[in-house]
Amino acid sequence: MRDEVIKGNILIVDDKPENLRLLSNFLTERGYKVRSVINGPMALMGAKAAPPDLILLDINMPEMNGYEVCNALKEDAQTLEIPVIFISALDEVLDKVKAFAVGGRDYITKPFEFEEVVARIENQLTIRNLQKQLQESEARERERAYQLEYALRQLQNSQAQLVQSAKMSSLGQLVAGIAHEINNPANFIHGNVIYTTQYVADLLELLELYQAQLPELTPEIQRRIEAIDLEFLKEDLIRILSSMQVGTERISGIVRSLRNFSRLDEANMKIADLHEGIDNTLMLLENRLQAQSGCAAIRVVKEYGDLPQVECYPGQLNQVFMNILSNAIDALQSNPGEEREQGNLPNSMPSSVTPTIWICTEVLNSDWISIRITDNGPGMSEEVQSKVFDPFFTTKPVGKGTGLGLSISYQIIQEQHGGLLQCFSQLGQGASFVVKIPLRQP
């Protein structure tokens, strides 16, 4: 076994030079690298400067005794794990108990046998090496477990986002198909309304000409005019046709918005007008912005800057706008009767209980633009704010949200567009989401 001795770096602490010389010479001959010091402060300095593998420590020394030195070593993270073997002429049980109490690993009484000292050193170094191996193994296993857990989370997130993306792609195709089916009859009605309005105007003009040329009407015609209330009929007919034209134009606008919004699976980036995307999204959400049962109508304030067109995936950005605006509407409708504070809300938003969404766009510099969407809803706590972009995190009731909307939005902005999506909020002072993206992609 002696040929297999684990060599190591030994620090000997003893105020007797003769003891230091004898131990140092013997251990050096046995293949150990040895350093010697004559007092406690020097031992602490040496142990911190170059931590040894083991310390042989005397107890009775000036300035600091061995117990104090060992206690100081164990209070320092840098020297905590260094094994300490006490060597002392004190052989009382209480002395030994105190040595172990302050962190000693072994105790050798003087006079000692050199072979016994070597055997105890080998034993402690073996134990220390095994402990190191165990700690390293545990660290590797913890790192492996963390990597596996991280990989699992990433896989779950990717799977959920793929499912959501597939749903949105299918939805986009469905919406595009519906928009096409609606568009054809809507265009037919819209075109006919224009002609019908003109024809009715011609007929009413002809009717007025008849009345002017034939002022003396027969009693039968006069009774019929009074029965149908001809004057009201002429006025109301024009109003009806006008409202029909407004309605068909509204349908055409919704169809255009549906077509633009449905471009979710476009493979290539395009130059797009982001204001058009925001307006299309707002049109699709217009019904939700209106007054609901127990909730006032939501006011939208648009402060658009002079944005140039942006190279982007327009359909994906529409999805981001939809997610942020939908969450703002949910927040404003969640506490309809709650007082709203001005806080750090935009200056254009008055301090009132009117639920409001404020949309501001601006050019940050020659390379970047910003879209800020702010609401004066109940806001969120720091804890919620720190998790708002985490997959599957939601504060909505079960069945009301998947917790994927903002997570996917974050991925779209950060990964797909090389941009930045930030959230700023305080309880009682609303929430603000800021999208920053480059004008052109590298």
Image (cartoon, grey):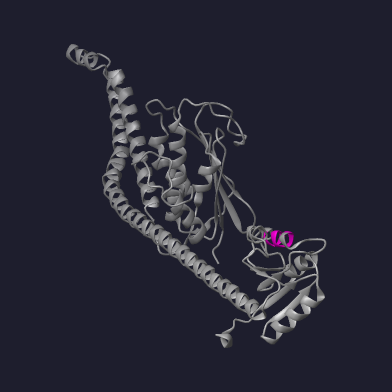
Please state the horizontal and vertical placement of residue 259, each as a whole percent of the image.
36, 51
Residue 359 seen from this side: no
Q: In this view, does 237 lie above or below 146?
A: above
Question: Which residue is nearer to you in this view: 209 or 342?
Answer: 342
257 part of magenta stretch: no
Stretch of the chain drawn in magenta:
68-74
Residue at the extreme left: 220
Q: In this view, does 132 lie above or below 354?
A: below
Residue 29 seen from this side: yes
Q: In this view, does 210 lie above or below 394?
A: above
Q: Is the magenta stretch mostly helix, strand or loop?
A: helix
- Residue at the image point whose x is 45% and y is 61% from the top: 150
Q: Is residue 237 left or right of residue 273?
A: left
Q: In this view, does 179 lie to the left or right of 355?
A: left
Please state the horizontal and vertical placement of residue 32, each as a whole percent of the image.
68, 82
Q: In this view, does 420 lie to the left or right of 279?
A: right
Please state the horizontal and vertical placement of residue 284, each as a whole percent of the image.
39, 42
